[in-house]
Amino acid sequence: MGNTLRIGTTVHCDVLIIGAGGAGLRCAAEIFEKKPGARIMAVTKVSHPQRSHTVTAQGGMAAVDPRDPVDKPVYHMFDTWKGSDCTADQNIIKKIVDASWEQISWLENHGMHFSRDEKGGLSKRTFGGMTLNFGESPAFRAVFEADRTGKGIMDTVWGEAMKGGISFLNQGIATELMFSGDRCVGAIVFTQKGGEFVAILAKATVFATGGNGQVFRITTNCRQNTGDGLALILREGLPVMDPEAIQFHPTGIVGPGILASETLRSVGGILRNKDMERFMERYAPKMKELAPRDLVSRAIETEIREGRGILNPDHNIQHVWIDLRHLPDYVHDEQIPEVTGFFKKFVAIDPKKELCPVRPSNHYQMAGIPTNEFGEVQRGPQGLIPGLFAVGECACASFHGFNRLGSNSILELITMGKFVGERVVGCLGENPGELPPEAGERTFRQFSRLMEAKGKDHVGKIRDTMQALMTDKVSVFRAEHGLIEAIEALKELKDRADNAPLSSRTYAMNQELIQRWELDNLLAVSMVMTQAALRRKESRGAHCNEDFPERRDEFHYHTLASMTEYGTVNFAKRPIDMSLFEAKGEHYEKFGLIERKY
Amino acid sequence: MSRVYKITLRVRRFDPDTRMTWVQEYELEAGRILRFTDVFRKINNELDPTLAWNSSCEHAQCGSCAIKVNGKPLLACELLVENAITHFGGTIFSIEPLTIAPVVRDLIVDIDKAYERVNKAKPYIIDPSPRPAGDKEYRIAPRELERYVEATRCINCFCCAEACISSHKNFLGPNAVMASIVRLMDPREQAREERLDLLYSEQGVYRCHTSMACSFVCPKEIDVAHFIALAKANRFRPGPS
């Protein structure tokens, strides 16, 4: 046993990518294009890159086609700025929007199976918040691959990374970063299959570890999205940005949490409470079910909190109904077949005849590891960490500010993936680092603590309690007293976690050990999220503080939060880039501190 | 709505530390719409934290949770308790890992080994065709895409490979073969000879016995056998077919 807690193998490569989803592998493909033969290693927690969360993205990717006679990049930039509640960085918005169509072409040229129009070009569809002429009318801006756009991206970038000669280490977790002076020189990785610790030395290390949806009980995120990347950054004493910025989708399917698309409401689905009342009439008399995502989410949560929800006994989850029974058969069969299929398959309900259970579900973290426009990780308000990059949902540049628009997330993966790849190539001339003498020691201390824990508690039960707590107090609605309670409760859960023994002391494919390690990550991320939410005494985008329902200009900054010991969170600020506004070019006035009203 | 079933899972387990294999029985109560992934989680939380199983997206889009239930390969996330009872006609279920790759622990197999066959089929465009002059993208008519788009939905869960009656050793397997066929039907691929060589090699489509088990078990309801039949009928060679 003692023999296991040592570095079994040391590996050298040019680039280490932690996380092999859409962003990580787009980055890898770019490196291979610029530098064929580069030695890239990608470590992923899932059993294969095709199992990454990217594959679940359904709808589409926003990009203004330069041949489009009516759409313009500046409209896309405006929509993103407005959607972000004026909290995205304008240099990032411009960079991503300007690069978007070229990246769509890249995917198409490399084999992605986009849906096509009659002329054989790429089909486009509309998406909430994506408009022409600064909000005038919906824009046909999102290209897509049927209802599986994310899978199309994943298959394409996986294929290209493989073609370039990448080495994958599947079912591995990065537990510690290695530094030589200031410079990041790689990471310690624990291989689940072999139960071995590997030191991977690299000239550049790229975080692409995805989101943290498992903080919440009801989430559209996959089982592995436990905020590992953010937690690792926190353990290194580095800050994460805007941890309080978390998006909730109004209609997740109870209990699997699968997204029931906005389409259900746009084709005429009606939300009802347990008394069968069409409650949206009270919250948005004009728009009713078609009100914006956050408003609908809050309406549903209010119904549930005031006792007008319905309890699903199998999953023990409160919900409301979406009523689709009145819709004609052709709407069911032609316009919403996929979502109808989800209800049939995962909750055994026929939406033509029965009411369907939905409730707000955690969907996306705008939060992330702070980076500049090249994906270089920031040490704080100033200063970069040489050799360390972050990209994708785990990173925060920030393109989405405090609220992300649909069809902007997978766009960010592929554009920033490319930019980070380009930048990484610049590092490849560096000398390879050497194994630092203390490498692995923190990991071994952590793992022996997990392995040796004594007590009567249970990892799964602590996780369930934490998820319920965060869903109750730190999700759609946040209130001062609830957040304070949550902070205390999280500290107790952390103590409980330290007294949760493992049933088996084996290292090879010990799922309970991994879950215990993940629980530390979830608890760390939950703590900074809750404290950051408490500190932001306003409402902005997805962050809704009931005690302060308005956006306030004094909070017009990004939160930087780091944690020295559990519960002690330190804060700093990063200014929001407003270069489009400051440039005073055409339409600059649209990029000031505008109202987010639809 | 609130019906609860008492079910029994007989799970084939394997411990790599002792190299022991055994069948362990778990009895538990489960609501009618719990998925088998929820049932495994319940076992971990209430009965046995050591039972190892795999999942990721848990809505049939990633293929991680493929296992055999009463001998049938399927995705555990798609199987609801009540549906399983109706489908299999009982409340006792035999749960086994797939046999397409060595078992790592319990229900987890070494999927990297299984993927080696997909990798052989090169699931990417080997040699891109020239693009039409002046266009940034290829043009593919919806009619042309329609011929093969079904096959692009494959998630490599390996249920088809598990159900296939041809030997795992000698045949690349339905999903791997289909990965190459997609690119033969995709006008953006030029490396046709290389792909045809693989399809008609020792490990290629003539190993298929046309049982059509692949189409029967595919969780994505892809008619895998149809694509293999096209290859067997020599439909991808130029000239008369």
Image (cartoon, coloured by chain):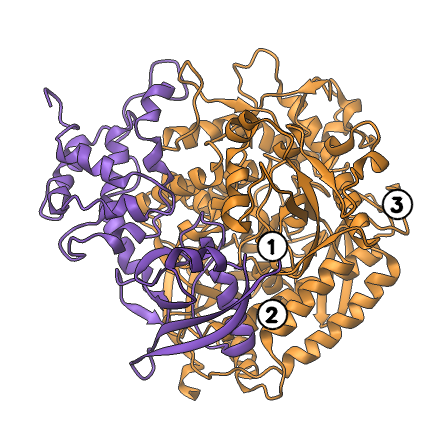
Q: For mark 1, does the 10 Å Cα neighbourhood hold few (<14), some (14 to 19), or many (20 or more) residues?
A: many
Q: Is residue A31 left or right of residue B189?
A: right
Q: Nearer the viewer, residue B16 or A491?
A: B16
The amino acid at mark 2 is Leu
Q: Who's orange, chain-wise? A: A
Q: Which quarter of the picture shows residue A527?
A: bottom right
Q: Secondary structure at mark 3?
A: loop
Q: Which mark is residue A436?
A: none
What residue does disc 1 label? A255
State the residue at coordinates (11%, 23%).
Answer: B241
Q: Position of residue A125 (x, y in %)?
A: 56, 24
Q: Are marks 2 and 3 on the same chain?
A: yes
Q: Secondary structure at mark 2?
A: helix
The amino acid at mark 3 is Pro
* The N terminus of chain A lies in quadrant: bottom left
**Res A237 visible:** no
Q: Nearer the viewer, residue A241 or A301?
A: A301
Q: Which quarter of the picture shows residue B74?
A: bottom left
What residue does disc 2 label? A519
Q: Position of residue A471 (x, y in %)?
A: 72, 58
First reached walking from the N terminus: tag 2 or tag 3:
2
Marks 2/3: CA–CA distance: 32 Å
Chain B colour is purple
Q: Which quarter of the picture shows residue A6?
A: bottom left
Disc number lying in front (1 or 3): 1
Mark 2 and mark 1 residues within 8 Å of each other at the beta carbon: no
Chain at numbered mark 1: A
Question: In the figure, A226 relative to A66: above or below?
Answer: below
The amino acid at mark 1 is Gly
Q: For mark 3, does the 10 Å Cα neighbourhood hold few (<14), some (14 to 19), or many (20 or more) residues?
A: few
